[in-house]
């Protein structure tokens, strides 16, 4: 369905046939150590606008998303609230800001704790992936609404990946243990989408440190499915990623102008 002229209901879910209400949790509480010194990563600017605002807009661009929970740097909740107030965001979307924790996992859990009960689909999206296209967001939501308990967008890796025995000292040669068949590997992105009860249970039961939410659901023994990701959903991690993000924004502006 792509009839943009049809008015959306004033409240309740819009943009999808299912009754499920969808919220997004955006962990933005990290420092961004790998990006180098400066403001917390989510507050650094791209094209003059904080990365976090790009990420919030990207999720709120989906008509299905009616609430965005931003998990702010622990001492930055007031600043994040005023940033959200200062930037134009869709009126159909509500916003909540909570302070984050010491790990991404803890930050996501604090965001989940702030979700009102009526939301039954949850997306978790890194603030550090500011340029994810709305079609990717919608594809994840659709797969959850179609019955998958957990959905991750992912792309085939472009490099061959080696498994090694990690060196004790940084920079020392590392023996290769194996070369996994690349056709079976996927590099995962966000937003990751979940049945809300499943994700809440994963965060309550899994204590091991993980770097993504879907792996917690895997540990519950449930099936996680992959849908196609997008190259513009890359994570801003190191300084070169900022250069790429600025270039993607510049290309979008050029294309919008013609
Ligand atoms: N994150 C968070 N709370 C933390 C750590 C990370 O909310 N305690 C968030 C980051 O803000 C980011 C996302 O998790 O949006 C993905 O993490 P990553 O890219 O690793 O960001 P940082 O942890 O900030 O970066 P680094 O690991 O380089 O310090
Ligand atoms: Mg990190």
Image (cartoon, rainbow, N blue to C red):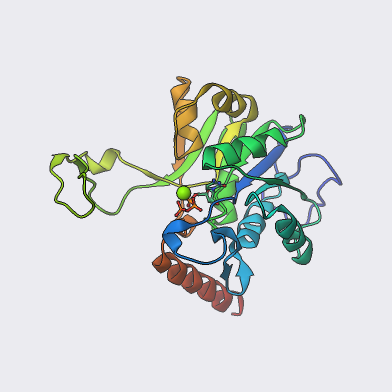
Q: Using the rendered view, name the quadrant where residue 196 is placed.
A: top right
Q: Residue drawn 66% across and 58% down?
A: 57
**Height in image: 193 above or below 46?**
above
Residue 167 percent coordinates (x, y):
20, 45
Would you say 112 lies left or right of 149 here? right
Q: Residue drawn 16% across and 52% down?
A: 172
**Height in image: 211 above or below 245?**
above
Would you say 53 lies left or right of 246 here? right
Residue 178 percent coordinates (x, y):
16, 38
**Height in image: 14 above or below 149?**
below
**Height in image: 10 above or below 114?**
below
* Res 113 visible: yes
Residue 17 percent coordinates (x, y):
71, 37
The C terminus: image quadrant? bottom right
Residue 132 percent coordinates (x, y):
54, 56
Q: Residue drawn 44% across and 64% down?
A: 36
Q: Residue drawn 81% across and 49% down?
A: 8
């Amino acid at each position: 369905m792509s009839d943009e002229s049809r008015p959306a209901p004033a409240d309740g879910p819009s943009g999808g046939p299912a009754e499920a209400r969808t919220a997004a949790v955006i962990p933005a509480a990290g420092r961004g150590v790998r990006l180098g010194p400066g403001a917390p990563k989510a507050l650094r600017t791209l094209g003059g606008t904080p990365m976090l605002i790009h990420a919030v807009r990207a999720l709120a661009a989906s008509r299905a998303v009616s609430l965005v929970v931003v998990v702010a740097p622990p001492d930055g909740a007031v600043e994040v609230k005023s940033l959200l107030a200062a930037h134009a965001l869709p009126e159909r979307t509500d916003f909540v800001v909570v302070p984050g924790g010491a790990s991404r996992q803890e930050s996501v859990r604090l965001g989940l704790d702030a979700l009102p009960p009526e939301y039954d689909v949850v997306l978790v999206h890194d603030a550090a992936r500011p340029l994810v296209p709305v079609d990717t967001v919608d594809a994840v939501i659709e797969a959850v609404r179609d019955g998958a308990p957990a959905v991750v967008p992912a792309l085939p890796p472009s490099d061959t990946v080696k498994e090694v025995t990690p060196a004790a000292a940084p920079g020392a040669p590392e023996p290769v243990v194996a070369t996994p068949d690349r056709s079976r590997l996927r590099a995962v992105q966000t937003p990751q989408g979940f049945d809300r009860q499943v994700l809440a249970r994963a965060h309550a039961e899994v204590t091991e440190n993980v770097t993504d939410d879907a792996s917690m659901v895997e540990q519950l023994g449930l099936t996680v499915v992959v849908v196609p990701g997008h190259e513009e959903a890359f994570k801003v991690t190191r300084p070169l990623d900022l250069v790429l993000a600025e270039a993607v924004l510049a290309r979008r502006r050029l294309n919008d102008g013609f």
